[in-house]
Amino acid sequence: MQSCELAATITAIACAIANNCSEEEVTIMASAFNQLGDTLATILAQESFINAQKDTGKSQKECKKNVEG
């Protein structure tokens, strides 16, 4: 799926939700989807950090030691 197709699909889904759910339901769903996105970003960032540590051979203790001086 191309990026514009994805954006159009998401927009269509948002419009369908907005037209078929109450304001309170939409508010809860919007909050839940924001939390989902933030949580996924956190998971990916943590995995990236762990992989970078493995690639450089540094442990978290070594990193902390370097930061503390």
Image: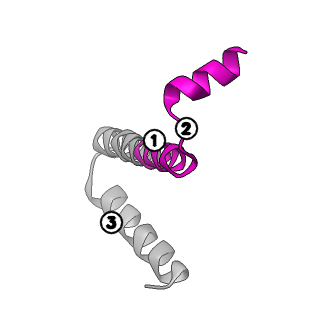
Q: Which residues are magenta?
A: 42-69
Q: Amino acid at mark 2?
A: Lys
- The residue indicated by pointer 3 is 16
Of tags 1 and 2, the one toward the viewer is 2
- The residue indicated by pointer 2 is 58
Q: Is residue 51 magenta?
A: yes
| Model colouring | one colour
Instruction: Report the disc number at residue 46.
Output: 1
Magenta stretch, main secondary structure, is: helix
Compared with 61, 50 (above or below) is below
Compared with 3, 45 (above or below) is above
Residue at left offset 40%, top offset 44%: 43
Q: Position of residue 19 (x, y in %)?
A: 33, 60
Q: Residues within 10 Å of mark 2 (few under 14, many from 20)?
A: few
Question: Quarter-wise, where is residue 63 in the image?
Answer: top right
| SS at mark 2 in the image | loop
